[in-house]
Structure formats: structure tokens, C-alpha cells
Amino acid sequence: MERTHGTILGQNASRVTHNDGNQKRYIWSSPEGGHKIDIGKQIFCNRSLNMKNIIAVGFDMDYTLAQYMPETFESLAYEGTVKKLVYDLGYPQELLEWSFDWKYMVRGLVLDKKRGNILKMDRHKYVKVAYHGFREMSKQDKVGTYGNTLIRDSFDEPDYALIDTLFSLAEAYLFAQLVDFMDNHPGKVPKGVDYARMYKDVRAAVDLCHRDGTLKQMVAKDPKRYINEDTFIVPMIKMLRDSGRSTFLVTNSLWDYTNIVMDFLCGFRTSSEDKAGKFEWLQYFDVVITGSAKPGFFHEDNRANLFEVEPETAMLLNTDNGTPMAHVGDISPRLVLKGGEKCRIFQGGSVGHLHKLLSIESSSQVLYVGDHIYGDILRSKKVLGWRTMLVVPELEREVELLYELRDTRKQLRLLRNERHLIEDEIHHLQWSLKFDELSDDAIAEKNAAIDDLECKREKVRMAHQHAQRECHQKCHKVWGQLMKTGYQNSRFAHQVERFACLYTSQVSNISLYSPDKYYRPSEDFLPHEFDILPL
């Protein structure tokens, strides 16, 4: 019988290559590996992490190992949500004619449920870009709504919704459409519905799509249509295991869907109709936990029951904290993989069960890779002390654009400095006019100098504004750079810096580095150091 593509990957992992444009990627353990890595594929470090101290590496599945295609998967989620709004929640039929622009929204935005606004703010929670629906708010409107308050708004639930996952982009776009629709056609929305209620209905429609299995059934029928293939995933996991690490999977998806997606990612291509697959992808993991209910899973005082999953039937078997319990009657034998290796599959439970199953003595021995700041990274880092890696797919394009725009960014810095110098000259002349005893000729001369400087300042301001808008729109036509808001780090970047030890554009970039690498952060700089220590 001919071997599957996935088996070939597993046995010849160190020889896998991949073309990224004109540059080939090689797995680190291959003879060609260990060379300079393209900037879009690099792993960036916030906190020192010595991989020699890591004994177990864990992965989330959805949007981490499985990178969904926004043009197909997000569109599917959007269409399903619209149908639920119309057929289950009483919204008008014309919503069915709407379309979805999957490139419009970005992560890190905040939805103001009460006012119908979409906000992008900096790390200090100052609103820098704001839209009401799809209408850009003026500077006066932004300041009047979010700047003139005695008490700073926290911009948290329940009045605000945080768009921190890629899956949330479709619901954010739909919310903006509904805001515009209600503003233009107030009589067409269900009676008593305001902006906050519309957002609540969108969330309810999304939940309905999940509960009835609409989305996952479509993905299971044709994974290739919705999930990006990444031939480096299997070599990456195999390299980690060959280096002596345990590997585990913790996902909120249930076993049936997890099996289909992981089969696809590992190259075995089990279809949704082939329920009696060989489960060969399990050879790359020690423990798989499905239905984990993250982020609650990460609380050690979580008392959720842990069930073992019988892979052939998806039947749940009782366990005593992971230890098999005696069963009455005929129970199918546990799955045994090639070489006698056993991968145990569970549903539910908590992090305490996982630590016991993998014999983890210290939480700092675990590296967990995920895509969700709150669901994967914040809880595992803040509550447990796990080491964390955040997957940010948008990062690859952004760092490549920043490299292309490096001359423009230098020009922006020079223009800003020039503007400061001109303003200082103007202020000095104005001070002299106010406090010095001057002749009429001297006063006229200083006023003329001020006029010239103000004209010069305006030219510099316009040049700076033009260059800044050019940079903003090249990164994203509406929201600009993901990790910046003006000159400040964005709210999203601030969270990445606080909670992710490492971050990168895709999970398989791990395969480009030594499994024993010591990741070290770059030096931090405060404003007073930039001119003293030029880079």
C-alpha cells in the first residue's frame, strides 16, 4: 500500500524544504539548516527563554497549528452569522445580500457597544483612530467622547468588546455594518434594538453557528478549502520530540473535529466520512486534550472532570485524575501506535491533570504556543507561569513592510525633530517680545522672523503628516500598523509585550531554530537613551 504524504514527512523530516518567494526555508536539523532566517519568519523575544530548560512543548490547534484562510473561513463564519440573525433573531432579509471584506478589520480593536464605535488605541488607552460604523470620527468627536472625562475609561467589558482573535474579525465587521444600517434605516431593525443589543445579537448568532456545528461541518468536508497547508508542522514536532521534549495538544475543539483537522495538517488526509482512520498523527504527541474549555482550563483549582476519549467511537471513559478506572463490560482497547508508543486522548480536565500526565514538576518547564492573548497566553503566563509563544500571522507582512519603509520612517523622525526645533525658536522669540525691552525695529524684525518660522513649521508639519499617512495606509488603509498607534505601541502590541515570552508569524517557524536555542531579548531603551546610544 502506498504511503501517505504525512508518513513521508514524518520519516524524512530533516530534509523538508519550502520556497518563500525566492528564498528557500530549511528545517534547522537538516544539513542545509541553521542559516540566516528571513525577517518574516523570525521568532522575536520579549523575555529570555532557554529552551534547554523546557521539557514539554504544547500547542493550541485552531489558528495556531491550523491557520484558517480568512477569505474562505471568515467568509463562511460571516455568512452563517448573517443567516442566524435573519432566520433566528428577526433581522430583515436584506442582510442576506451583504458581503464581507475580510481585509477591513484587524486585531487589537475595541468595540464600543453602547455608541456603535470601533476604536484603535495606544498602550496608554488613548483613542487615536475611531470610526462610527464605517464613518471616521473627527478629532473633536474623539476627544469629546473619550478624552474629556474626569475618570479614565478602562475600555473593558461589559460596555466594550475586545477584538483579540482572528475569529472575531467577521463579527466586528458585521457590527459596523449593522451600525450604519440602523443609522440609515432606523425603522428596519427589530423594535427596541440599540447598538449594544445589536452586538449582543451578533454574538448570539455566532454562538448558534458554533452550537449547531455549521462551521465545523463545512471545514470537515473540505479542509483544504479552509485551512492553509504547512508542510513544516510535522518536521517541527518531530524535531522537538527527537530533542527529548514531550509534546501535547490542548484545544477547545472536540475529538471528532480535532482528528479531522490534525489528520489534514499532518498529511494523512482522513475525510469526515472516514471515521475509522488510523489516527497516525497521534504519533507526534504524548497527550491530546480536547474540549478543554480554555481559559478556565488553566486554573489549578478547576475541578472539571477528565475523561479519556476512545478514538474509534469518541466514547468518553471515566478516569481517576487521568488514571484509567476499572470498567464493567467490554471496552475497546486503548489505541497503540507504531513502535508501541501510546498517545492518550482526553476531554475536559484542568492544567493540574496535564502536569500529572506529563510529570511536570515546575510550570516554567512548559512552553505553550497559542494565538489568543486571553484564551491562550495571558492565563497560561499570568496564572501558571508557563513560558509562552504567541502566533501573530499578520506579523510576517508587517515586518516586511516596515523593512521596505525604513527610509520613510527615518525621514519621519528627522521631520519631527525639525518641527521641535522650529517651535522652540518661535517660543524663544515670543518670550523675547513679551519680556524684553525692544525697539520698534527689533519688534518688527522678531515678528517677521516668527512669521517665517511659522510658515516653515507648517511646511514641515504637512510633509510629516503626508509621510505618516503614507506609512499608515501602506500597513493598513484604515487602521495602520498593527503594533503601533501613531508613535506609541498599540494596545495589542502592549499585550504582546506583557504576556508573550516569544512571538512569531506562524508556529512552524520553530522548525527553523535549534530546539536548544537560548532566546534573548534586545536591549530596552528609554527616550533619554536614544540619542546617547544611537543604533
Image (tube, rainbow, N blue to C red):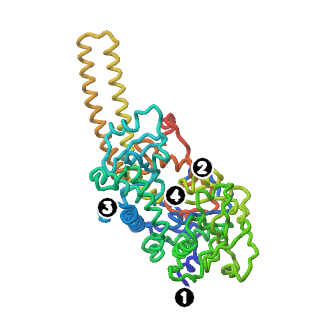
Which dot, 1 or 3, sits closer to the camera?
3
Closer to the camera in the image, 235 or 145: 145
Q: Position of residue 175 (x, y in %)?
A: 38, 55
Res 92 label: 3
Mark 4 sits on what residue?
504
Q: CA distance from mark 1 to mark 2?
A: 46 Å
Q: CA distance from mark 4 to mark 3?
A: 42 Å
Q: Are marks 1 and 2 in contact (CB under 8 Å)?
A: no
Q: Are marks 1 and 3 in contact (CB under 8 Å)?
A: no
Q: Are marks 1 and 4 in contact (CB under 8 Å)?
A: no
Q: Earlier in the sequence, mark 1 or mark 4?
A: 1
Q: Are marks 2 and 3 in contact (CB under 8 Å)?
A: no
Mark 1 sits on what residue?
2
Query: Which type of secondary structure does the marked residue at label 4 adopt?
Result: strand
Q: Quadrant of residue 351?
A: bottom right
Q: Residue at 45% of width from left, 59% of height from top?
A: 204
Q: Quadrant of residue 283?
A: bottom right
Amino acid at circle 1: Glu
Amino acid at circle 3: Pro
Q: Quadrant of residue 314?
A: bottom right
Classify mark 3: residues with Cα within 10 Å, few (<14), some (14-19) or many (20+).
few
Amino acid at circle 2: Arg
Q: CA distance from mark 1 to mark 4?
A: 36 Å
Q: Are marks 4 and 3 in contact (CB under 8 Å)?
A: no
Query: Which type of secondary structure does the marked residue at label 3 adopt?
Result: loop
Residue 284 in the image: above or below residue 447: below
Mark 2 sits on what residue?
47
Side (left or right) of 494 relative to 381: left
Q: Residue at 23% of width from left, 16% of height from top?
A: 444
